[in-house]
Image (spheres, rainbow, N blue to C red):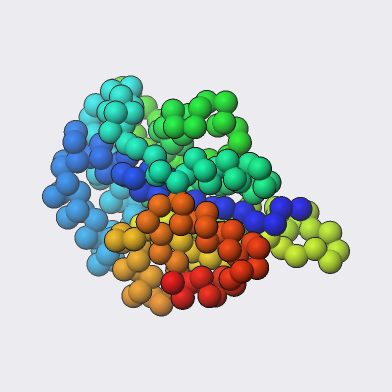
C-alpha cells in the first residue's frame, strides 16, 4: 500500500506561469479584461466555468500555434523534477488535477520530463473539442460550475486507494499543492495543503481559515513531505508555517 499521495494543480504550481492566462493575455482579450472577468468569480456573479469559457474563447489562434507559444514561454518549477524522481523512487503516486486542458498539460509535461515519463503520473483535466469553424474550445469534464470539480476527482482516488487497504493498514497521507481559487475545495479533501507564496490561494485560505504551508518552489514541498513522512513534524505543525 502507498504511504502517501501527491495531488497537485498544474498551472502556476508545477509550472511557474499559468498557461491559460498566458494565452489569454498574449493572444486573447488581455490581462486587464481577464482580471475583470475573474472578479465575477470572487463576487459570486459568475461560476469558474463561465469565466474560464469567456476568457478561453477569446483565444482565436489555432491550437498548434498556442502550443508553440507555451513551449517557448512556460517554465517548470525548479523543484518539480526532483520531487517527481523522489516520488518514483518511493512509490508515491502523483495525480495532476487541473481546471485546464489535458492536451496542453500532457504536451508540457512531456517536454519538461520526457515523453517516456508521461505514464508515470495521472493527469485529470478537461478536454479540447473543435467547433465546425475549426476553432478549439474547452470541453469540460463534469457538469459542475467548476467545469472540473477537483474535490470530486480526489474523493474518487481516495476511495480507490482506501479500498486496497488490508486490515491494520493506515490510509495514506494526502498532500495537495496549489496556487489558485480552484484549489480551495480540492485542498479541503487532503491532509496537508501546500500553497504557493504570493498567490490567490493564500488569500482565500486566510479568508476561510483553511490551514496551509507556504511554498516558494517544489523543493520546499519535497522537504515538507519528507519531514511528515519520517515523523519529524506532524501535518498540523507544518501547517503552522
Ligand atoms: Mg493554478
User: Is 125 in front, or is 228?
Assistant: 228
* Drawn side of residue 16 relative to residue 143, left or right: left
Dividing the picture into quadrants, the one containing residue 15 is top left
> Residue 55: x percent and y percent?
24, 44
Q: Can residue 58 be seen in this view?
A: no
Horizontal and vertical percent position of residue 8: 49, 51
Q: Which residue lies furthest to the left in this view?
A: 32
- 135 in relation to 199, above or below: above
158 over 89 or under it: above or below: below
Q: Image point 45% across, 66% down: which residue?
A: 213
User: Is 185 on the left-hand or right-hand side of 121?
Assistant: left
* Camera-nearest residue between 127 and 105: 105
Q: Residue visible at 29% across and 28% down?
A: 72
Residue 62: x and y, percent? Answer: 28, 23
Quadrant of image for the C terminus: bottom left
Q: Quadrant of residue 205?
A: bottom left
Residue depicted at 31% across the width and 59% down the height = 199
Above or below 136: residue 31: below
| Residue found 13% across the figure and 50% down from its top | 32
**Front-most of residues 100 and 17:** 17
Give percent across and percent down for residue 210. 44, 73
User: Can residue 194 be seen by looking at this rendering?
Assistant: yes
Q: In this view, does 200 lie to the left or right of 129?
A: left
Amino acid at each position: 500500500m502507498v504511504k502517501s499521495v501527491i495531488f497537485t494543480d498544474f498551472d502556476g504550481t508545477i509550472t511557474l506561469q499559468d498557461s491559460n492566462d498566458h494565452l489569454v493575455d498574449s493572444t486573447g482579450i488581455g490581462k486587464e479584461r481577464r482580471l475583470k472577468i475573474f472578479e465575477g468569480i470572487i463576487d459570486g456573479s459568475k461560476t469558474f466555468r463561465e469565466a474560464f469559457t469567456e476568457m478561453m474563447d477569446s483565444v482565436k489562434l489555432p491550437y498548434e500555434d498556442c502550443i508553440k507559444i507555451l513551449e517557448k514561454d512556460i517554465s517548470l518549477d525548479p523543484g518539480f523534477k526532483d520531487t517527481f524522481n523522489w516520488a518514483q523512487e518511493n512509490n508515491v503516486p502523483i495525480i495532476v488535477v487541473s481546471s485546464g486542458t489535458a492536451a496542453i498539460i500532457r504536451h508540457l509535461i512531456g517536454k519538461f520530463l520526457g515523453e517516456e515519463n508521461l505514464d508515470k503520473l495521472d493527469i485529470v483535466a478537461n478536454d479540447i473539442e473543435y467547433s465546425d469553424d475549426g476553432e478549439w474550445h474547452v470541453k469540460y469534464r463534469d457538469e459542475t460550475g467548476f467545469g472540473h470539480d477537483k474535490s470530486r476527482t480526489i474523493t474518487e482516488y481516495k476511495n480507490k486507494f482506501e479500498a486496497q487497504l488490508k486490515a491494520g493498514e493506515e490510509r495514506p497521507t494526502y498532500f495537495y499543492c496549489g496556487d489558485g481559487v480552484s484549489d480551495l475545495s480540492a485542498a479541503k479533501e487532503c491532509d496537508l495543503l501546500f500553497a504557493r507564496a504570493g498567490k490567490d490561494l493564500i488569500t482565500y485560505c486566510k479568508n476561510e481559515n483553511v490551514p496551509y504551508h507556504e511554498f516558494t518552489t517544489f523543493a520546499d514541498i519535497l522537504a515538507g513531505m519528507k519531514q511528515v513522512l519520517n515523523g519529524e513534524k506532524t501535518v498540523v505543525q507544518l501547517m503552522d508555517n
